[in-house]
Image (spheres, grey):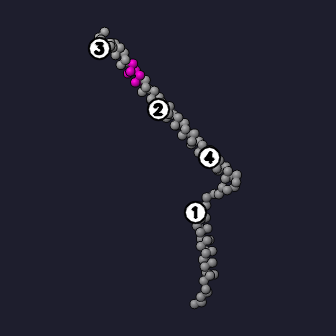
Amino acid sequence: MVQHGNASWDVVSQAVVEVGESVEASIKIQRLKGKIEGLVTDREMEKVKKEREKAKKRKVKNREREGTTEKKKTEKENMLERMMKMEATLECLSKQLPQVNY
């Protein structure tokens, strides 16, 4: 054994090996923690997605129960409704204007 100060090289080399092993172990632990955290976040995201879907279904069921579900109007229905409103407005305006005979 070679003596250096109070410690022998064997002890120093053993300490280096142990430190190296503990560093490797801590790296492995960090990787596992990351994987576990990743799994947790994936699971949490799945839960959130499922909760959102359930909430959507509940809203639809509540609307159906209340009878407030309305089918979306088609473009033709919207246009017809606008035209009827315009006709009513024109009629109202034409009644308010003084009658002019040419």
In three-dimensional space, the C-alpha distance between marks 1 and 3, rounded to whole angstroms, equals: 92 Å
Q: In which quadrant of the rendered image does the C terminus lie?
A: bottom right
User: For the point 45% across and 29% down, which residue is it?
Assistant: 30
Disc 3 is placed on an element classified as strand
Looking at the picture, how far across and down is residue 2, in whole percent?
29, 11
Gap in angstroms between the C-alphas marked 3 and 4: 72 Å
The percent coordinates of residue 32 (x first, y second) are: 47, 28
Q: Are marks 3 and 2 in contact (CB under 8 Å)?
A: no
Horizontal and vertical percent for residue 62? 67, 50
Residue 4 is tagged as 3
Q: Which one is earlier in the sequence, the residue at label 1 or at label 2?
A: 2
Front tag of 1 and 3: 3
User: Which callout, 2 or 4, points to the residue nearer the camera?
Assistant: 2
Relative placement, left or right, of 10 versus 59 is left
Select label 1 or label 2 by which is in front. Answer: 2
Which residue in the rendered view is the most extreme toward the top? 1
* Residue 54 colored in magenta in the image: no
The answer, for residue 13, to whether it is visible in the render is no
> What is the three-letter code of the residue carrying label 3?
His
Q: Earlier in the sequence, mark 3 or mark 4?
A: 3
- Say which residue appears at 53% left-offset and 34% top-offset: 40
Q: Circle 4 — which element? A: helix
Q: What secondary structure predominates along the stretch shown in magenta?
A: helix
Give the quadrant of residue 79: bottom right
Q: Secondary structure at mark 2?
A: helix
Residue pointed to by mark 4: 55
Q: Amino acid at mark 4?
A: Ala
Q: Residue at x 61, y 64 (%)?
A: 77
Tell me the number on the disc at residue 34: 2
